[in-house]
Image (cartoon, rainbow, N blue to C red):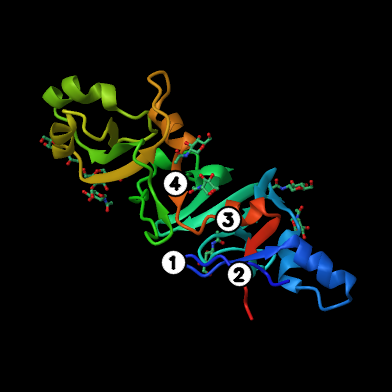
Amino acid sequence: MKPVNLKSTLFPAVCLVFFTLFFQARKGLAVDENLLICRVPRYCGGQLIKFPFFMQELNEPRCGYPGFNISCRTNNTTAVISLRDGDYIIRDIFYQNQSFLVSKPDRDAVCSHSMRNISLPEDRFYLPENQRDMVLLFNCNLTTRAVAELSRYKVDCDESNTTLALLNGDPELSLASEYCTKSVLAPVAFIDGDQGVEDVVNRGFVLNWIASNCSICQSTGGKCGFDYK
Ligand SMILES: *[C@@H]1O[C@H](CO)[C@@H](O)[C@H](O)[C@H]1NC(C)=O
Ligand SMILES: *[C@@H]1O[C@H](CO)[C@@H](O)[C@H](O)[C@H]1NC(C)=O
Ligand SMILES: *[C@@H]1O[C@H](CO)[C@@H](O)[C@H](O)[C@H]1NC(C)=O
Ligand SMILES: *[C@@H]1O[C@H](CO)[C@@H](O)[C@H](O)[C@H]1NC(C)=O
Ligand SMILES: *[C@@H]1O[C@H](CO)[C@@H](O)[C@H](O)[C@H]1NC(C)=O
Ligand SMILES: *[C@@H]1O[C@H](CO)[C@@H](O)[C@H](O)[C@H]1NC(C)=O
Ligand SMILES: *[C@@H]1O[C@H](CO)[C@@H](O)[C@H](O)[C@H]1NC(C)=O
Ligand SMILES: *[C@@H]1O[C@H](CO)[C@@H](O)[C@H](O)[C@H]1NC(C)=O
């Protein structure tokens, strides 16, 4: 009985089947150590962490894809993943459609001048198309005429310089950017007129991941993982 190999064009992942393991174990043969380790369910803040993700602190890179390392912080309650522009909190993982919900780690990201444009490792993650971008404009110096037209976009930040937030595509965007020195794009999944910009940005956005489809492997009782031999 040979393990089934599912080869992706992007990364070579491996599908190991349970009954192979039991078969080998009964016969007293060497049990595949990788399979045993990756079978143990891992949780961070109640969220199941499994392939293609793996837990950074447990040092089990063979259980996931490179770049899918999750750090479980704040007393093992917060799952954190690194994108190019910085760390994000994983709020939910949807294994069935290969996507996950993330948000900035700091509550006041919107008012922070150090905020950066999102930058993805494009060989791993991409933004689904059904989302909007919020444009945050920093260091705005509004003239009296502009104040009248743009004040409804003002973000309630505790500072002297004005910050504005508009949805990408808003007709007032080009006017607004004339008065500000820095602009940052923030993807958002939920647009709710009743919510402030900060809440909308804090609720986060969805990312899709690119990886081989492990549900085929898992439906046959297998466990997806890397075969480091
Ligand atoms: C972590 O948990 C310990 C014990 O439950 C608690 O004393 C501590 O304040 C917690 N730390 C944080 C950062 O939540
Ligand atoms: C977090 O989880 C790790 C691994 O499971 C464990 O060793 C550590 O004691 C936990 N830390 C806290 C604060 O619960
Ligand atoms: C994931 O691994 C990379 C490379 O080792 C590291 O730079 C990054 O900080 C890690 N991410 C997390 C969330 O720990
Ligand atoms: C993965 O494969 C399963 C079974 O063939 C299918 O139902 C599912 O939609 C696929 N998922 C993705 C993200 O392609
Ligand atoms: C995947 O499914 C979840 C839960 O149904 C949903 O919230 C999320 O938006 C979906 N992801 C994509 C990329 O559509
Ligand atoms: C306020 O905006 C000006 C330019 O309009 C900039 O030089 C200054 O650094 C900003 N202040 C802060 C606190 O960012
Ligand atoms: C803001 O704009 C006004 C009018 O254009 C200008 O006089 C003032 O110096 C500007 N302030 C800053 C901090 O750039
Ligand atoms: C963010 O991206 C936009 C559009 O690509 C660009 O105009 C802007 O300068 C970028 N902001 C920063 C801080 O790099």
Instruction: Find residue 164 and report its horizontal and vertical position in percent.
Output: 28, 33
Q: Earlier in the sequence, mark 3 or mark 4?
A: 4
- Direction front: furthest residue: 1
The residue identified by callout 4 is 207
Instruction: Find residue 208 and report its horizontal and vertical position in percent.
Output: 45, 48
Instruction: Tell which tag, 1 or 4, sits nearer the viewer.
Output: 1
**Tag 3: amino acid:** Cys
Instruction: Find residue 21 and report its horizontal and vertical position in percent.
Output: 78, 67
Instruction: Find residue 138 and report its horizontal and vertical position in percent.
Output: 27, 41
| Quarter of the picture holding the C terminus | bottom right
Give the alpha-carbon distance from disc 3 to disc 1, as whole Å: 13 Å
The residue identified by callout 3 is 214
Q: Earlier in the sequence, mark 2 or mark 1?
A: 1
The residue identified by callout 2 is 226
Would you say the beta carbon of the disc 3 residue lies within 8 angstroms of ligand 4? yes
Residue 9 marker: 1
**Tag 1: amino acid:** Thr
Give the alpha-carbon distance from disc 4 to disc 2, as whole Å: 23 Å
Q: How many labels does the image show?
A: 4
Mark 4 neighbour class, 10 Å CA radius: few under 14, some 14 to 19, many 20 or more? many
Q: Which residue is drawn at 89% across and 70% down?
A: 26
Say which quarter of the image contains residue 34: bottom right
Q: Is residue 80 left or right of residue 130?
A: right
Say which quarter of the image contains residue 196: top left
Q: Is residue 214 left or right of residue 199?
A: right
**Tag 2: amino acid:** Phe
Q: Is residue 143 left or right of residue 68?
A: left
Secondary structure of residue under mark 3? helix
Instruction: Tell which tag, 3 or 4, sits nearer the viewer.
Output: 3
Q: Which of marks 4 and 2 is nearer the N terminus?
A: 4
